[in-house]
Amino acid sequence: MNKIFFCDIDDTLIGEKKIISKKNLLSINKWIEDNNIFVLATGRGIVAIENFIKNYDFAKYYIACNGAIILDKINNKLLHNDYISKDIVKLLYDYGVKNNILVYIHSMKTTKTHIIDEDIYEVTYVVNEPFEKIKLDKIREFVSLHKEVQITHDYYNQYKKYHLFDINLKGNSKGLAIKRLLEYLGINKLDSFAVGNGNNDISMNNYVNKMFAVENACEELKEIVFKTVASSNEDGVSEAINDVMGEENERNR
């Protein structure tokens, strides 16, 4: 086991076409062939990850729901799971319905737009254009009233023209999930790398050796990363992986 690379999915690994480009896939496969690990680190739930990756075989570990779930696919072992209380889930859901917000409820087994009797790891609000800024501010204010939860991802999708809020139990982030997974695998921080685009990816910067941002990333992320690579539409993930592998090859010459 050598190095580990953490990769966001939406607007990072995939762009407007919503597919993994041949160039990105080629670099991922070469990374794995060199005895490295590739991890999907996303705000998506487990079901959405499984649907996305069903035609591929490169990710053996998932960081899902912005770190509220860590799954070891090799051993079918849940390494971390932190769900929101049912009372809070209902409050969040009811607020969304009342204010004409599209609400997604993420459990371990499914993603629904209605309340289900399962442990819920994430509640997602999607506000489609046109919308007024005051509506977004009211969402932030409402969530802040509930101290058990936090907005982990507050993001405008420039391709599909909507604003997204992922809400998770406090104490979870992609960064903390990386820390937990590195400890589980016994991998040194110096051997870890990541790439992302959103403000939910900022926390990863604190727990990896080098963090990359795709060109279409939010400014807050681009300001702190090691390097900004090409956009999600132009194979930025491939560039980031090749940057790491090129540096390692130079070091080992």
Image: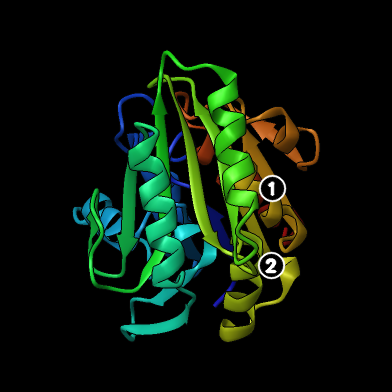
- Along the line of sight, the residue nearer the viewer: 118 or 183: 118
* Residue most extreme to the top: 130
Q: What residue sits right under mark 1 in the picture? A: 202
- Along the line of sight, the residue nearer the viewer: 87 or 45: 87
Q: Which numbered tag is attached to residue 191? A: 2
Measured as percent of width and height from the top left, residue 146 is found at 60, 59
Give the side of residue 199 with respect to residue 78, left or right.
Answer: right
Measured as percent of width and height from the top left, residue 226 is found at 77, 43
Residue 247 appearing in the image: no
Q: Marks 2 and 1, Cα distance to the nearest angstrom? A: 18 Å
Decide: few, some or many residues near mark 1? Use Cα within 10 Å; few <14, some 14-19, many ≥20.
many
Residue 112 appearing in the image: yes
Secondary element under disc 2, as helix, strand or loop, is helix
Q: Residue at x 32, y 48 (%)?
A: 104
Q: Is residue 24 above or below residue 91?
A: above
Q: First in sequence: mark 2 or mark 1?
A: 2
Give the side of residue 61 with respect to residue 140, left or right.
Answer: left
Decide: few, some or many residues near mark 2? Use Cα within 10 Å; few <14, some 14-19, many ≥20.
some
Q: Residue at x 53, y 16 (%)?
A: 132
Give the side of residue 158 with respect to residue 98, left or right.
Answer: right
Give the side of residue 15 with respect to residue 184, left or right.
Answer: left
Q: Amino acid at mark 2?
A: Asp
* The quadrant where residue 108 appears: bottom left
Confirm or deny contact between disc 2 and disc 1 (CB under 8 A). Answer: no
Q: Residue at x 50, y 39 (%)?
A: 238
For the C terminus, give its image quadrant.
bottom right
Q: Residue at x 37, y 51 (%)?
A: 93
Measured as percent of width and height from the top left, residue 75 is found at 33, 86
Q: Which numbered tag is attached to residue 110? A: none
Measured as percent of width and height from the top left, residue 157 is found at 47, 26
Q: Amino acid at mark 1?
A: Ile
